[in-house]
Image (cartoon, rainbow, N blue to C red):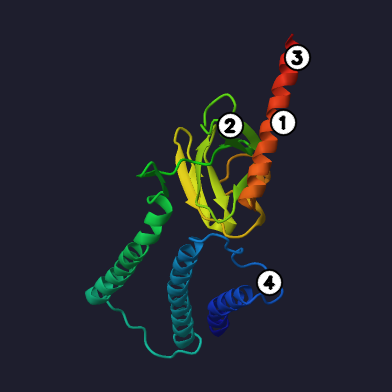
């Protein structure tokens, strides 16, 4: 049975590589199971970093699987007649297998610093009156069980006023522009995930955070929660629509008009 188990262990890296190839090359039955289409100008950096780490860890995975197969095959007790040899270990080997993983992790940490800074630290700026300032958020996203509440500034362009526009699970964005969104949580920990723009950020109660990206393609895409946040986590989904600046302005103007009509109706009823 020893040789059987060695072959079984060999199937782990073989099947792992096969699944990867089938998914990347869109070969049935794994077609459509790889990364979703990237529509973010800055998303290529994330994809390259992901693939680099995947290839690196994949090589280690394959090497480890082959080594396990070889030792199981070579030293199978049913066929190996050599006497058992006891050793007390090797300090050199222990140092090597401690230093190599540490050096690899340190290399990855340094390699990804620029990508991390672009995604988490270097917030887009705009020029106002000849002075460069941090770009304000286009909308505020609030995660709560179990929906994404979206808040746009009213006609005065200032978020946080009484004339703000509210949407639920329906985010609209202009194409080919740097988008900044502020995100926060009303109740528990959520994770704001836009797979098509390679943005995922934990939404922590009591904290306001920011994400940014530049969509370069129109269409409708998913908003999901990537953090288990309660019994209704599975249905905490929304969508964001990327459209031309003209279409976005027209949509926003329609929201203003509907809000003004609702306000007028409410005031009439009170009178």
Dot 2 or dot 3: first in sequence order is 2
Where is mark 1, residue-wise? 258
| Residue 253 image point, x, y percent | 66, 37
Secondary structure type for disc 3? helix
For the residues labelled 2 and 4, the Cα–Cα distance comes to: 46 Å
Secondary structure type for disc 2? loop
Which mark identifies residue 137?
none
Side (left or right) of 116 relative to 248: left
Between 6 and 204, the one lying in front of the other is 204
Side (left or right) of 220 relative to 99: right
**Above or below, comparing residue 264 to residue 164 in the picture:** above
Dot 3 or dot 1: first in sequence order is 1
Task: Confirm or deny contact between disc 1 and disc 4 (CB under 8 A).
Answer: no
Task: Confirm or deny contact between disc 1 and disc 2 (CB under 8 A).
Answer: no
For the residues labelled 3 and 4, the Cα–Cα distance comes to: 57 Å
Between 132 and 119, the one lying in front of the other is 132
Where is mark 3, residue-wise? 268
Where is mark 2, residue-wise? 155
Task: Confirm or deny contact between disc 3 and disc 1 (CB under 8 A).
Answer: no
| Residue 10 image point, x, y percent | 54, 81
Determine if residue 169 is in view. Answer: no
């Amino acid at each position: 049975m020893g040789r059987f188990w060695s072959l079984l262990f060999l199937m782990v890296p073989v099947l792992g590589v096969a699944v990867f190839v089938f998914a990347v090359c869109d070969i049935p039955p794994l077609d459509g199971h790889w990364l979703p289409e990237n529509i973010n100008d800055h998303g290529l950096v994330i994809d390259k970093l992901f693939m680099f780490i995947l290839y690196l860890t994949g090589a280690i995975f394959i090497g480890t699987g082959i080594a396990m197969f070889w030792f199981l095959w070579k030293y199978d007790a049913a066929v190996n007649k050599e006497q058992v040899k006891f050793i007390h270990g090797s300090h050199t080997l222990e140092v090597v297998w401690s230093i190599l993983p540490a050096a690899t992790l340190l290399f990855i940490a340094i390699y990804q610093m620029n990508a991390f800074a672009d995604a988490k630290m270097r917030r887009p700026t705009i020029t106002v009156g000849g002075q460069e300032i941090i770009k304000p958020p286009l909308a505020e996203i609030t995660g709560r069980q179990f929906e994404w509440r979206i808040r746009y500034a009213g006609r005065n362009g200032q978020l946080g006023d009484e004339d703000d526009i509210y949407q639920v699970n329906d985010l609209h964005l202009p194409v080919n522009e740097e988008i900044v969104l502020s995100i926060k949580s009303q109740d528990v920990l959520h994770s704001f995930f836009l797979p098509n723009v390679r943005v995922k950020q934990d939404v922590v109660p009591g904290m306001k955070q920011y994400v940014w990206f530049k969509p370069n393609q129109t269409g409708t895409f998913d908003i999901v929660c990537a953090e288990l946040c309660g019994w209704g986590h599975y249905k905490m989904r929304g969508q964001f629509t990327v459209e031309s600046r003209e279409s976005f302005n027209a949509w926003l103007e329609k929201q203003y008009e509907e809000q003004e009509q609702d306000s007028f109706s409410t005031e009439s009823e009170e009178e």
